[in-house]
């Protein structure tokens, strides 16, 4: 891989901020919240998909993997947000000292 000497590559990532922590916490809450919401919807509806309204993206995931796939995507979204929030909090606390 060639690099341009005028634009050196940086190994440093963007420094953590409290704004990032808040947004990642929001992403985690949305992910876990939708996972619970969809689980409750699917468990009440049984096998009748016409009782559950899905977005276009959710419908594609549902057709490929079923209702557990839709729930798993939201759980992964929640884990991603929680992981990044924890990493950024640790970075902020270590920078303070």
Image (spheres, rainbow, N blue to C red):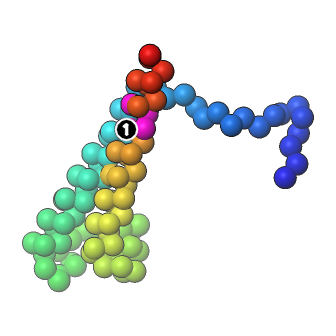
Q: Which residues are magenta?
A: 85-89
Point out residue 92 in the picture as x, y percentages from the top left corner: 44, 25
Depth check, front residue: 94 or 66: 94
Q: Is residue 94 above or below residue 82?
A: above
**With 5 as the anchor, is 52 left or right in this view?**
left
Residue at x 17%, y 81% (from the top left corner): 48
- Residue 2 position within the rendered picture, expressed as x and y whole percent measured from the top left: 88, 48
25 drawn magenta: no
Taking 15 as reference, is 1 above or below it?
A: below
Rendered image quadrant of residue 85: top left
- Does the rendering let one see residue 23? no
Farthest residue in the left direction? 44
Q: Residue 89: x and y, percent? A: 39, 31
Relative to 32, does residue 7 appear above or below in the rendering? above
The dominant secondary structure in magenta is: helix
Q: Is residue 5 above or below residue 31?
A: above
């Amino acid at each position: 891989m060639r690099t341009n000497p005028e634009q050196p590559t940086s190994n440093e990532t963007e420094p953590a901020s409290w704004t990032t922590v808040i947004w990642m916490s929001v992403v985690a809450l949305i992910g876990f919240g939708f996972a619970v919401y969809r689980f409750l919807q699917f468990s009440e509806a049984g096998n009748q998909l016409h009782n559950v309204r899905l977005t276009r993206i959710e419908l594609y995931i549902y057709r490929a993997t079923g209702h557990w796939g839709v729930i798993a995507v939201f759980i992964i979204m929640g884990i991603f947000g929680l992981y990044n929030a924890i990493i950024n909090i640790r970075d902020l606390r270590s920078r303070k000292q």
